[in-house]
Amino acid sequence: MSGNPRVGVDLRVEGLTKEYTSSGYVVRPLDDLTFTAAAGELAVLLGPSGSGKTTLLSCLGGILSPTSGSIHLGDVDITTLKGSDLDRHRRNDVGFVFQSFNLVPSLSARENVAVPLLLRGEKKRSAFERADALLDRVGLADRAGHKPSQLSGGQQQRVAVARGLIGDPALLLADEPTANLDHVQAEAVIALLRELRSEGRVIVVSTHDARLVPVADRIVRMGSDAEASEDPPTVVEYTAGETIVRQGDPAQLVYTIEAGEVEVVIELADGTEEHRAVLGSGRYFGELGALLGFPRSATVRATTDVRLTSYNPSDFREMVLHEPG
Ligand SMILES: Nc1ncnc2c1ncn2[C@@H]1O[C@H](COP(=O)(O)OP(=O)(O)O)[C@@H](O)[C@H]1O
Ligand SMILES: [Mg+2]
């Protein structure tokens, strides 16, 4: 089915950063993100709302320009494309599927799927033939003449997937495609996306739903749900008054206190602090965020000079489980 010579190429994202300035402060939803997805793989972007999933998909699709970093599809860095080359990338290399389906209500399923081809001047007859073949591919051959309002949400999303494939793209991008679907319909859409990757495309699906993890060939964790540290245990020292972990920051390490004392405080919205605890030698802190992937829930500050050992979550887990007492 694949006539596009680019189908079968890998996606490589390196050091991708996107900054927005909004009402005076900088938001950086993408901060030095690196991942690859090989041809024929389904990559899942997993992260909560606001973690930069749509921003990343927009950069991959060439509709948003990153602040820095590169996106290679095969040997082409799409962040460097301009003008007609960029248009060609958007038109030929990328298919989009949206959370809200975005079908044209007055058009039949067949017409909706064919729209991208008709817009670029292809003959109706061949465009409809290809649309029918794709509707068959997504299991909707018998619904080609139906309007979106006559289809279930899951069926509409499968029409949208067929439309995303009509240009035979190397890269199919789906932004929370199951968010508006019930469980059964969501499963059908995911099963379809999984099947489609075997055609040599790279499929990138964003979601906040960890239930999609088992179907992915790759998981790209977005936002503070960052890649777990694999650093070995390391001794670190702080002087009295220094902040060791900051409330709200991404949590990656757990600390044990070898010598000295720290205090745990909660920073309140009005700028004041609530004192929670003083911890001394032999105690540990930071385990909740690091083990569960939550941001730091408190600030921890050295009250004397302290010596700590930092552990990544898996080493920490092992140490706690294996040490007697
Ligand atoms: N055009 C924009 N201008 C300023 N900030 C933006 C813009 N688009 C997105 N953001 C901010 O970037 C962050 C990531 O947004 P988004 O990529 O939509 O995340 P997600 O899709 O994971 O919910 C959010 O904090 C959002 O407010
Ligand atoms: Mg989004």
Image (cartoon, grey):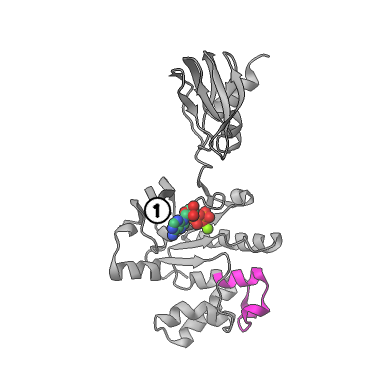
Front position in the image: 50 or 188: 50
- Mark 1 crowdedness (10 Å alpha carbons): few <14, some 14-19, many ≥20: few
Tally of numbered discs: 1
Q: Is residue 309 at least partly visible in the picture?
A: yes
Residue 209, image x and y in percent?
A: 62, 52
Residue 270, image x and y in percent?
A: 56, 39
Q: Is residue 56 at least partly visible in the picture?
A: no
Q: Amino acid at mark 1?
A: Thr
Which quadrant holds residue 133? Answer: bottom right
Is 204 inside the magenta-drawn segment?
no
Residue 176, image x and y in percent?
A: 57, 59
Which quadrant holds residue 189? Answer: bottom right
Looking at the image, residue 286 lies above or below residue 261: below
Q: Secondary structure at mark 1?
A: strand
Is 148 inside the magenta-drawn segment?
yes
Per the image, the residue denoted by label 1 is 21
Residue shown at the point (53%, 23%) measured from the top left: 255
* 124 to the left or right of 290: left
Looking at the image, residue 163 lies above or below residue 247: below
- Which quadrant does the C terminus fall into? top right
Residue shown at the point (38%, 49%) measured from the top left: 16
Is the residue at mark 1 in contact range of ligand 1, meaning its CB lies under 8 Å from it? yes
Front position in the image: 28 or 174: 28
Which quadrant holds residue 316? Answer: top right
Dominant SS type (magenta): helix
Residue 273, image x and y in percent?
A: 56, 31
The span picked out in magenta is 140-160
Residue shown at the point (43%, 54%) measured from the top left: 23
Residue shown at the point (67%, 79%) measured from the top left: 150
